[in-house]
Image (tube, rainbow, N blue to C red):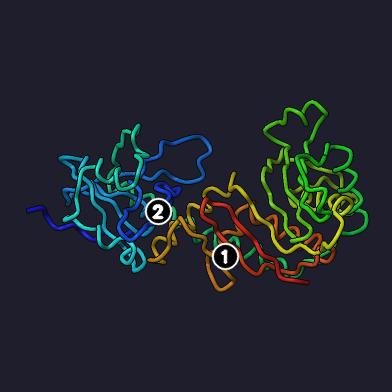
Amino acid sequence: MPDKIKTIPHYGNPGKAIANNLSMTSRSVAAVPVLKKKEQGDPVLQAVWVDDPDSRYFFWDPLVDGVQWFSDKEDPDKMFFKARNKESIEKYGHLEGIGNMRPRQEWVKLHGKDPMKKENPVPISIDELRMEQKKNLVAFEDFFGKGVERYERLKSAPGRLSKETEEDRELFFKSKYINRQFGQRDDDDPSAPVNYKAVMGNEQLWRDPPKKGLYVNEIDLAAGKITADQNYGAGEEYDDRTTKKKERFNNSEVFYQQWKEAQKVIKGEVSKDLNILRRAHVSGDGIPVVKAVKAWLFQNIPEYSENKDIMFTKKDKCFFALLAAANCAAAIFLIADHGREMGIAGIATITLCAGESIEIVFEKA
């Protein structure tokens, strides 16, 4: 008789949604858990098989759509899963448990494909997992404190730049960047969104963009929305007459300059107010922040799933922790520097989306 499965406290090793496509019919099964190889630029720590010495089964971390997968150490091809929250029990309960253990290929037939076909899983120890979990949770508290401090600064922010600083930034943008509209737009709809690519450098760099000093964003004035697609700063600095020193030319200023350009192009029923900033990708110092937030969610929110969007308000610690990432801090700079012009006075919600994009909804001025 197989030994009893330990109920392992799940703190979450925040990983990409490894086994996706988890929507199920009444008699289907979740995707086979996938071990994704480490790739440069992956925004999260890898999902892995974990070796618990007190059990005869490896377990998969993190949870996948609320379920935890297990494989037999003596015969890893044999797999089963346990539902870990109310929603997953309702969706997958009829197929969970040791009694439903079956060969990998049978799970593949139920799912329709084998995303792990070319993988060679190497389990990590449970001690390694716990160390990583602890590190992420400690980091979360640090990010939370930093985010609170950043948001508190907004209370004293003027919401408008001095005339000299505004002129200096606009001159720097127009003289140092090639900023052009690109791609298709619906000429039959004068309010259709426009896409801009700004590159710091010459014409050749615009055609063959560098890895830094590149900004590609969509401006939708009808929806009052900026979708930040690619934004890779090069540490640019401009001469500021107000502070009488060189200042950082932030990503938020590129958003603002492109927003102004769009107002010259987009006609029809449009708003001059900004409602939403969507970061299509998490990158740079945002990677450890999102990783830490997911670790906290896995520990504290049993129903949390990486395959679903989760929205935070100022009542949530995750709201402030996410503000520690530069990907979100740009929203604070927009409010502080251009809040009056863009009709924004604060942040209402921050949503961590499935796929790790982030959507920020502003409070009206």
Q: x, y (%) of residue 234?
A: 72, 38
Q: What's the residue type where badge 2 is placed?
A: Leu
* Residue lying at 26% horizontally and 54% vertically, measured from the top left: 81
Residue 323 position (above or below residue 236): below
Which residue is at the far top?
204
Q: Nearer the viewer, mark 2 or mark 1?
A: 2
Tell me the element at label 2.
loop
Q: Position of residue 260 (x, y in %)?
A: 85, 53
Q: Residue at x 17, y 51 (%)?
A: 55
Q: For marks 2 and 1, give the CA distance.
A: 27 Å
Query: Front-most of 329 and 240?
Result: 329
Quadrant of the rendering where the C terminus is positioned: bottom right
* Disc number for residue 319: 1
Q: Amino acid at mark 1?
A: Phe
Classify 10 Å Cα crowding around label 2: few (below 14), some (14-19), many (20 and above). Answer: some
- Helix, strand or loop at label 1? It is helix
Of 169 and 139, which appears nearest the observer?
A: 169
Lateral position of residue 13 relative to residue 198, left or right? left
**According to the image, label 2 marks what residue?**
22
Q: Residue at x 86, y 59 (%)?
A: 268
**Local crowd at mark 1 within 10 Å, few (<14), some, or many (≥20)?**
many
- Which mark identifies residue 65? none
